[in-house]
Image (cartoon, grey):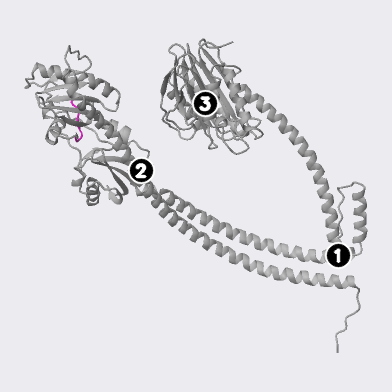
Amino acid sequence: MALSIPPMGVRTKILIAFLIISLVSLLIAGGIASTAIASLGSQAIRESEALGGQAVSDSTAALIENAEEYLMRLAIDQASYTSLYFEDTKKVILTIAAYTNGIREETGPVSATQTTEMIAASAHPSEDERRALSRMERILVPVVSTHPDITRCYIGTGSGIIRIYPKTELPPTFDPRVRDWYMNAVSTEEITWSRPYIDAAGEGLMVTCSYLIEDQDYQWVVGGDVLIETINQMVLDITISGDGYAMLIGSDGYVISRPGLTVDDRLWDESYTTENLLDSPNREMRAVAQKMVAGDTGISRIFLDQTEVFITFAPVQSTGWSIAIVMPVETVIAPALQTGEKLSEQTQQTADEIDREIRRSMHLFVVTMVVLIGSAIVGSAIFSQAITRPLQRLSEGAGAIGRGDLAYRVHTGTHDEFSELADNFNTMAKDLSAMIADLERTTAERERLSRELEIARSIQESFLPDRAPDIKGFDLAATSIPALSVGGDFYDFIPIDDGRYGLVIADVSGKGVSAALFMALSRTLVRASTAAEPSPAVAIKQANRLIYEDSKTSMFVTLFYAILDVHTKTLTYVNAGHNPPVFLRGEDASFTLLLAEGIALGVLEEIDLETVEVPLHDHDVLVLYTDGVTEAENEHGELYGEERLEAVLLDVQDRTASGIISSIVEDINAFAGQTPQADDITLLVMKTGEKEE
């Protein structure tokens, strides 16, 4: 007997079908979701623990590999620098030796006032040799004065005389002929380096570079002293994280220099010997020392004083020594160990959090299922009742939109073509309303930004000097043209003291508001650091430290700073990574770029700057500029360049400083044509001689 289904309308059938599908779908989804939640929680904990362990292992291996590469590069670079450092000392000694014969053969009166002569108690030198030796002051003084790293330089003779610069008091029992530096030079007849010894003049530990001067009449040895402290500061004072340090050993295995090397209470004539690494009780250290003595380059991982360390080494070619850098392994892998501990703690916290979330999710899921089932029943009833009203609501919505009521929304309560049509109506009304609101908001925002940028430009212009100082005998002018509403270039005229003025031009990385803000900070710090400071290098180093401390955005600033001395007519300058200014000599119309070693401000906390002094004459022209001048482009992508700048300057050198600036700007605009300005253009011109009216 067939099952009899009572007759029902389409609306009733849709209602029943929708209700059945909804309930079945919710029950199936609920069962799958509850199982998946529990499984995913367990899997997440296992994966978190595995990833944590792998991360620690990988990071440890990577840190060790990177540390080995870094230490090897550091050892090689430091060995090269050390070799050049000692090569310079050797050149001083050889220079003195090379000039010996010519100076000694001179005749005339002798006036040795800047050196000290000492004669050993048992010595009986001739007067001719003493006069010849005193003439060596002419080469000792200028050569040693230009090499401040050399503590003193001297010539010791086989007859027992020693001539020293600068003047030094030595003990009465001092005899140069029994000193190691003298005997080594005589025995080898080559330029040699001594082991560390206690200085007779009380300076501390010292090494000496000595050389036997070839001569048939006298036996002279020229020597130059370098303090171990100086070696530590100039050569071994490298930045190594943690407990790392550097040391030098000689070709015979004796330590030349290392941290903590002192003379204790020993006197100059007492025996003093540093440790010999070839005799170290540590077998691994002896093996490393043998490689260093052999002149090898490499890295070893050994135990030193019960601590596992990396020791990298490289030869110092100019002396036959070797430099080593020691770094504890624990220092290298410390970040990985700390990361492992944090990962372990985080993993446990994650596991606890996952458990709590699973329980919370299950409770929420049960509540949600009940709510969804109830909603499905209620929704089905509402759906069946509302299915006949879609067309009416669509008609009402179309009328409301036609009257301009864009806030009106059509809701059919269905999921069919009527619902799609209602959604299209709603989307159209929403988009139209948003478009009108956005247009109003955009217009207001543009007006506000325009006003704020105009204010920012006025403020930035107030940072720059209103006019150049009026200095008798000098004509100064400057201008700055930002590429955007505000820029990152600035210039300044800073009065230091009577007759001395600081000239500044700088270029901040980037453009726009961020560059303008950084420009304001940099300009203030530079002015504060340079005021009343006579040394340009000291002033700019101080400014760099202040900029580095305040910079949090990795921005930097290139800067050229010069001190104009009106009385001496000189220009003393430093260059912190800026374009070298163009200097046109008035007397012969020759060009010179004012070069000096230095890097941009704000990159490193401590920097080195080379100070250069330039004499000034009448009609000289100095042009300071930023890269917006030489890197201006035309429509073909060509750069304006230094050659065009020099050509224009040569044509207009007879004009005033402001006239020169106007001519350069006009030429740049003519060159660029319709190509928009891509970078800030800033110029500062100084011309010697009275300003032409």
Disc 3 crowd rating (10 Å Cα; few below 14, some 14-19, many 20+) is some
Q: Which residues are magenta?
A: 194-200
Q: Is residue 199 magenta?
A: yes
Residue 640 lies, in percent from the top left, at 56, 32
Towards the viewer: 322 or 1: 322
Q: Earlier in the sequence, mark 3 or mark 1?
A: 1
Residue 627's tag is none
Q: Which residue is mark 1?
A: 383
Picture disc at residue 74? 2
First in sequence: mark 2 vs mark 1: 2
Please identify the quarter of the rendering in which residue 656 is found.
Answer: top right
**Disc 3 to disc 1, C-alpha distance:** 84 Å
Q: Which is closer to the viewer, label 2 or label 3?
A: 3
- Location of mark 3 (residue): 646
**Residue 419 screen position, x and y as percent:** 84, 61
- Nearer the observer: mark 3 or 1; the answer is 3
Q: Secondary structure at mark 2?
A: helix
Q: Nearer the viewer, residue 62 or 109?
A: 109
- Would you say residue 151 sits in the magenta stretch? no
| Residue shown at the point (66%, 28%) measured from the top left | 456
Residue 137 sits in quarter: top left
Image position, residue 618 (x, y; %): 47, 13
> Measured along the vertical axis of the image, is residue 664 above or below residue 24?
above
* Relative side of 109 to 524, left or right: left
Q: Looking at the figure, which quarter contains the C terminus? A: top right
Q: Position of residue 673 (x, y in %)?
A: 65, 32
Q: Amino acid at mark 3?
A: Glu
Closer to the camera, 139 or 653?
Answer: 653
Q: CA distance from mark 2 to mark 1?
A: 77 Å
Q: Is residue 322 left or right of residue 161?
A: right
